[in-house]
Image (cartoon, rainbow, N blue to C red):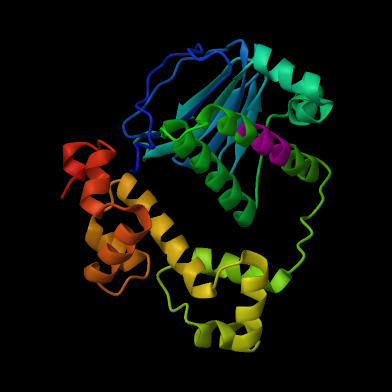
Amino acid sequence: MQKKLYTDFNKRQYMQAPDYEIFYYNDKNLDHVSPHSHDYYEFYFFMEGDVTYMVDGNTYPFAPGDYLLIPPGLPHYPIFAPGSKTYRRFVLWISKEYYEELCGRSSDFSYSFDYVQQKRSYRFRTDFITYQNIQGKLLDMIEEKNSSKPFGDINMQLMLSSFLIQLNRITYDIANQIKPEYRNVLYLNICDYINRHLADDLSLDFLSEFFYVSKYHISHTFKENMGISLHQYILSKRLQACKNGILSGMPFAKVVEQYGFGDYTSFYRAFKKEYGVSPKEFKKQNKLPEDFIE
């Protein structure tokens, strides 16, 4: 059963868990957070809002997909523009003790935070595909954390370790101005187009004409890289976007229109098959405010 993904915001700046905590915040009318510092490591991933961020005296404007790496002891806080929009972000905290334990297993874990401590530069900007990948990894961790599946604790540790290594690779590439080398440019271009045009015609006929390649080549390339069909990928991406839209309070009619479903019945059936609950049940399970419930 789908668990609540968003975390109710509070101004707590200390850890309750001994090793790590992860939050997915979605706030409206949040206009002030006091400057603060803490004794743990923080990864901050920005998704939506009209916000700049102060870290150790540096001011960083944000674009969706930007992330901050904040070592212990550094003062930081957000600055909200007047009449700010919805403010959506992920925050991951890692205790000093757990971080040192990971680095004791391998120094490879320490690259990103070593880099920012040396350079005193804390913000990193990602491309669209990297942004999607990071968001997916963080949502997977949130869902695992909130699940009651057996072996959840050890799986969370593995997921966190994997995420930190992936983050180090991203930080390294950005710091060294290395453009991602993708094995299959066509496949990634198609993925990027799909993610940017979920409401549009994404039929195989259209994509074949748009990218000037045969339908067979697109289908084969996609299956080889993803292990699923093009249709399955598009449906999955549309449903993920619908889920995020519902969580942000978007009306069902707008969700259906904006993410490429022809009618509510098709959306309803696909959503329930994918997530095991109806869209309305999903809203209620996530304990959205009453004005979000239709």
Q: Is residue 161 left or right of residue 10?
A: right
Q: Is residue 165 magenta?
A: yes
266 or 228, nearer to the observer: 228
Q: Quadrant of the N terminus?
A: top left
Among the 4 quarters of the image, the one containing residue 174: top right
- Our reading of the magenta stretch's main secondary structure is helix
Q: Is residue 203 magenta?
A: no
155 or 108, nearer to the observer: 155
Q: Is residue 208 left or right of residue 47?
A: right
Q: Is residue 197 something one can see in this rendering? A: no
Magenta residues, start to end:
160-167
At a point 45% along the width and 62% down the height, the residue shown is 236
Indicate the position of residue 171 as horizontal and vertical percent values: 74, 39
Which residue is farthest front? 150
Indicate the position of residue 216 as horizontal and vertical percent values: 62, 87
Indicate the position of residue 98 as horizontal and vertical percent values: 66, 17
